[in-house]
Structure formats: structure tokens, C-alpha cells
């Protein structure tokens, strides 16, 4: 048996083929890390100043009015309630911002991705690197905020250590989702829709500022399936020195969002690059 | 047994075809690049040059055809092939956040090269690009020519066997262009092979051992620059312009030329007997004439026409 030598047309590959991921993503991740290292301190200040303002203004201001909030029948100081929710929100925002505006700059404006693809690095690995990079940035932001929260003595539960990897997962979920819209964007303006039409409502409907049971039943139904509300459900008990309930359910929702989004982001990015 | 009389091609493209919608961007294109050779690809805008290069890099999937490089096949072995290629694209993709030396270091990592290995090579690469004094400057601080040379140095970071250069001198001033040519000639002397697309015929003539003329995605001519000129053109061109020049196109002077073309206000006589033609032109002292040997530009215009392309 010999293989016939035919000048056959290369088979067209499906855009939905399995991701071709490899360790070649690492130099791309490293590239972003190096650029960021040059501006880490100013960018860190920018990243944590806003969430801290929310925390101080709402936590201490509103907290004085609200006093305590009941979570699963248990009274919790409002500042603790807010801190545990807003840390998830910060992870969401940091990851989304990086995977939208910054990734788009590298992909479309600077053509950094095109340059990389002339070297032996595939598009799938570049998308993976961007996804992990945005998640890392979220983790970095969140770590800084956690430090401030510890300093303010908002919580000193040792279980907050467990919240840390969960927040990395939140970063991965939201950076994967953002990359879907990055792949579709024609310009930066497009991202305003994502922020105002999706992230802002998500912020209000995920139990960051007030408990979900305040919501009308129909809205509650939607809210329960939002990725951020599932993240908050996992992280808040840890701040209260308790273990979260329904871990598989909440974790499963986050993983599902991440996996589906990353796959869609890959397919749409391949389409954008004609691959 | 394989004959060893001529080395096997380094790069081979067979029956390459690409369609976008109803447009054939590349049609049944075949060519080879021998080791140490510089193959030039010339053609008007939209002729399919960049699409061909993108297919050679596995960035665009051909509808049909076969690309073999260094004994490997595109697109299956795309990454293994690219590990041995150097690429300079039409638009610079330099990293604006890094200085020149960092640009080289970071790019070397994409090839899986160790930092120490790349760092050792950086001084020589910067020297080659005449950028030693700019090692700490970011691309934003560089001139157009410097940026292009940094792109070329970056393409050499993996010590490639073959360079794919898409219009490497477009937009450069004559000094910068000549420096780029010197560098490319140096690379050819070192035994590297080059695939070069260009709009500059003097560049093609100077650098390329062989030329491929593309139009509408098809190969319309292939050969050594001098052979192509000799094959398609008369040896001499006399350009005549000035008041009343256009009338000459239909005058008895025509008999002295094998071919006459009119473009704008200028009449082009393509001739094998320039002496007789020039003598006859002495009768028209008010006209300005330019006598020169036929060149690649004449060939290019003859093969692809003088009209501006709609997408140009």
C-alpha cells in the first residue's frame, strides 16, 4: 500500500474545530506582562482607586443608614456585604477592560497579533494568551483590593485565601466573554454597548449592592443565571468565614460561561483573521 | 535515485488558487525558489501578491494547490515552516511599547529562542540595521527607514533560510531605500533566499535573480530581468513630449519604431533603430526627447497596461 501523491486542495477547516492550544502561548503572555510591568504602579492605582471609592462611599455612607443586611437569615455588616460583592465586580471589570480595549489595541490598532503570527505561534495560542493575561490582570487588581480590605479590617476570615483562586476563575470567565466582543468589534465604540448594556445591568442584578431576594421573581430568574451573581454566591460566604453552598452549581455556571465563550471567541477570531 | 545536479527548491508553490466570492484573487499559480535565489514578484495593486504571501505563511487557506517549504507542507506544518522563515510585511508590526533591543528579544521568544541566545545576537542585528545608537529608542521615535530596518532585523532573529518581504521599501526616501538594498544584497551574499514583492522596478532589477509578473492573480511572465526585457521589448525607447508631440504618433516617424505608445502628452517609440529615429526627430527642435534603454518599467507597463487600477 502506498499513499497516492495528489495535489489535493487543502480541506477547508471548520471555524468551530477544537482549540489548538500549546505552550507557545507563553511568550505572548510574557510580552503583555513586560509591557504592563513598565506601567504597573500607575495602572494599579487606576484599577483599585475606583472600587475603593465605591467601598468607602457606599460601605461607610450607606452602611451607616442600612446597618446590617440579612444573608441566609444571618446578619452581616453592610460594608462586609458590599466588599465581598464588589471584589467580584472588580475582577469582572478589570478582565473585561483588558480583554476589550487593550486586546483590541494589540489585535487591530498595533497589529501586534499579525506580527506574532508571522512567527511560529498560532492564532489560538494568541487568543489563549490574551484570555489568561486579562484574567491575570484581574487577579492582580483583586489582590491589591484584598490587601486594602484586610488593612481596613473589613474581614479577616482566613477563608478569603480560597476566594483568591475563585476570583482568578471570575477573571477567566469575563475575559473569555469579552474576547467574543473583541472579535466582533470594528472600533472601540462598540465596547460601550457591552459595558452599558451588559456589564452595568449585571453589576446591579448580581447581588453586589443589595441581596437578590429584593428583585421581582422574573428578574430574579435572569439574575440567578448571570455569571457575576454566581461568583458573588461563591465569594461572599468566604468573607463571612463560612463555606459557600451549591458550589458545584455556581462553579459550573462560571465554567460553562468560560468554556462556551472562549470557544465562540476562538471561532469568531478565526473568522476575523480568515482562518 | 535523486539527481544531485541542481539543488531541490527551497520553496515550491503548485497550482495555487484563491477565490473571494466571485473574484479569483490567485489563479493556478506555480513557482519555485532555489536556495540562495532572490525571486521578485511584481504586479499592479490587487494582482494577488499579498494574498500569495499570506498563503505561503499559512495565514490564508488556498482553495486549491500545494505549498511545500524546506521539505514540509503548508498548512499542516505551518509552525515548523515559519520557525525557519523571516517575514517583513507591508505595514510594520513593531511593538510600540518596547525599544529596538526589546523588540528583537520579545520577537525571538516567539520562536522559542532562549533569552541568552537572542541577547547575544542583538548587537549584531542592530548593527546590521544601522540602529546601534537607537537600541534604547522606541519605534515611535524612529524614521520610516529605521522602522523598516528594525522590521528586517526582527525577521532575522531566528537566522532564517528564507525571507518573505512584502514591499520592504515602499514609502522610503532614496537614501533609506539604498541602505535597505545594500542590506538585502548582503543577505543574499550570505546565502539566504528571498521572496520579494515590490512596485519599484529598479529594486526588482537590482536585487532579483528571477522575476514573476502577476496580474489579476495570474502569472503572465517569468524569467531573469534582462531576459524578460530582451524577450518582450525592443532594446531602445525614445520618449517625445512637447507641443505637437502627439501628432508624431501617426506620422511617418512611426516607421522607425517597432511599437508606439501614447500616454498623456508623451509618445513612446520602442525601437531597434534609435539612430534613424533620433535623426528624423532633429527636424522637430521644439520637442523634447529622451533616449534610454528599455527597462523593467516598460516591460511592466507593456504586460499589465498603463491604466490605473480601480482599487489602486
Image (cartoon, rainbow, N blue to C red):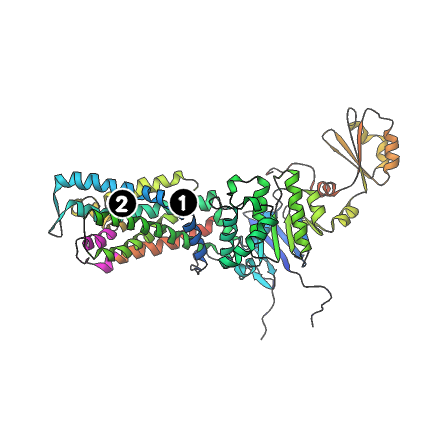
x, y (%) of residue B53? 59, 51
Q: Nearer the viewer, residue B259 or A82?
A: A82
Using residue B297 as the reference point, say whether residue A165 is left or right of it.
left
Is any part of residue A188 visible from this angle? yes
Q: Residue at x 35, y 55 (%)?
A: A260
**Neighbour class for label 1 at 10 Å: few (<14), some, many (≥20)?**
some
Using residue B33 as the reference point, say whether residue B154 is left or right of it.
left
Judge whether residue A224 is colored magenta: no
Q: Which chain does tag 2 point to?
A: A
At mark 1, the secondary structure is helix
x, y (%) of residue B70? 61, 62
Q: Residue at x 25, y 42 (%)?
A: A52
Q: Which residue is mark 2?
A: A202
Mark 2–mark 1 distance (CA, rounded to whole Å): 22 Å
Q: Quadrant of residue A105?
A: top left
x, y (%) of residue B110? 49, 56
Q: Which stretch appears magenta?
A: A230-250
Mark positioned earlier in the residue sequence (2 or 1): 1
**Neighbour class for label 2 at 10 Å: few (<14), some, many (≥20)?**
many
Amino acid at each position: 500500500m502506498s499513499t497516492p501523491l495528489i495535489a489535493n486542495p487543502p480541506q477547508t477547516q471548520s471555524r468551530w474545530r477544537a482549540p489548538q492550544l500549546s505552550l507557545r502561548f507563553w511568550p505572548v503572555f510574557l510580552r503583555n506582562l513586560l509591557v504592563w510591568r513598565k506601567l504597573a504602579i500607575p495602572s494599579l492605582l487606576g484599577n483599585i482607586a475606583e472600587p475603593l471609592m465605591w467601598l468607602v462611599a457606599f460601605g461607610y455612607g450607606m452602611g451607616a443608614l442600612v446597618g446590617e443586611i440579612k444573608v441566609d437569615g444571618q446578619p452581616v455588616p453592610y460594608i462586609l456585604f458590599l466588599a465581598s460583592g464588589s471584589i467580584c465586580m472588580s475582577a469582572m471589570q478589570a478582565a473585561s477592560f483588558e480583554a476589550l480595549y487593550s486586546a483590541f489595541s494589540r489585535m487591530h490598532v498595533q497589529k501586534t497579533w499579525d506580527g506574532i503570527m508571522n512567527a511560529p505561534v498560532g492564532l489560538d495560542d494568541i487568543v489563549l494568551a490574551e484570555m489568561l493575561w486579562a484574567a491575570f490582570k484581574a487577579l492582580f487588581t483583586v489582590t491589591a483590593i484584598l490587601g486594602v480590605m484586610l488593612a481596613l479590617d473589613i474581614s479577616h476570615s482566613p477563608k478569603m485565601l480560597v476566594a483568591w483562586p475563585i476570583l482568578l476563575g471570575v477573571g477567566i470567565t469575563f475575559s473569555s466573554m469579552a474576547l467574543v466582543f473583541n472579535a466582533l468589534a470594528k472600533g472601540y465604540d462598540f465596547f460601550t454597548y457591552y459595558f452599558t448594556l451588559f456589564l452595568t445591568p449585571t453589576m446591579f442584578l448580581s447581588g453586589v449592592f443589595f441581596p437578590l431576594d429584593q428583585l421581582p421573581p422574573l428578574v430574579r430568574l435572569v439574575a440567578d443565571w448571570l455569571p457575576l451573581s454566581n461568583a458573588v454566591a461563591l465569594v461572599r460566604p468566604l468573607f463571612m468565614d463560612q463555606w459557600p453552598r451549591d458550589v458545584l452549581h455556581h462553579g459550573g455556571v462560571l465554567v460553562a460561561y468560560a468554556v462556551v465563550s472562549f470557544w465562540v471567541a476562538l471561532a469568531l477570531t478565526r473568522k476575523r483573521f480568515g482562518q | 535515485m535523486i539527481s544531485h545536479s541542481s539543488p531541490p527548491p527551497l520553496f515550491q508553490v503548485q497550482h495555487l488558487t484563491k477565490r473571494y466570492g466571485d473574484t479569483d484573487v490567485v489563479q493556478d499559480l506555480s513557482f519555485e525558489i532555489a536556495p540562495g535565489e532572490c525571486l521578485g514578484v511584481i504586479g499592479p495593486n490587487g494582482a494577488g501578491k499579498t494574498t500569495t504571501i499570506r498563503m505561503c505563511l499559512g495565514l490564508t487557506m488556498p482553495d486549491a494547490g500545494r505549498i511545500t517549504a524546506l521539505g514540509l507542507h503548508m498548512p499542516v506544518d505551518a509552525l515548523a515552516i515559519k520557525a525557519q522563515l523571516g517575514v517583513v510585511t507591508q505595514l510594520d508590526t513593531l511593538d510600540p511599547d518596547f525599544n529596538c533591543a526589546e523588540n528583537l528579544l520579545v520577537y525571538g521568544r516567539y520562536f522559542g529562542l532562549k533569552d541568552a541566545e537572542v541577547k547575544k545576537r542583538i548587537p549584531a542585528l542592530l548593527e546590521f540595521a544601522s540602529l546601534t545608537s537607537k537600541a534604547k529608542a522606541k519605534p515611535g521615535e524612529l524614521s520610516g527607514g529605521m522602522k523598516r530596518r528594525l522590521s528586517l532585523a526582527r525577521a532575522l532573529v531566528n537566522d532564517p533560510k528564507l525571507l518573505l518581504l512584502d514591499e520592504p521599501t515602499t514609502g522610503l526616501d532614496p537614501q533609506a531605500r539604498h541602505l535597505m538594498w545594500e542590506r538585502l544584497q548582503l543577505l543574499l551574499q550570505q546565502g539566504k533566499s528571498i521572496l520579494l514583492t515590490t512596485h519599484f522596478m529598479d529594486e526588482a532589477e537590482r536585487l532579483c535573480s528571477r522575476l514573476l509578473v502577476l496580474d489579476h492573480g495570474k502569472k503572465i511572465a517569468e524569467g531573469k530581468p534582462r531576459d524578460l526585457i530582451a524577450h518582450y521589448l525592443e532594446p531602445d525607447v525614445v520618449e517625445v513630449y512637447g507641443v505637437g508631440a502627439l501628432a508624431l504618433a501617426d506620422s511617418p516617424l512611426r516607421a522607425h519604431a517597432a511599437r508606439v505608445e501614447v500616454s498623456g502628452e508623451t509618445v513612446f517609440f520602442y525601437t531597434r533603430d534609435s539612430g534613424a529615429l533620433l535623426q528624423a526627430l532633429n527636424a522637430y527642435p521644439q520637442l523634447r526627447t529622451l533616449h534610454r534603454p528599455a527597462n523593467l518599467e516598460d516591460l511592466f507597463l507593456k504586460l499589465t497596461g498603463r491604466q490605473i487600477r480601480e482599487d489602486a
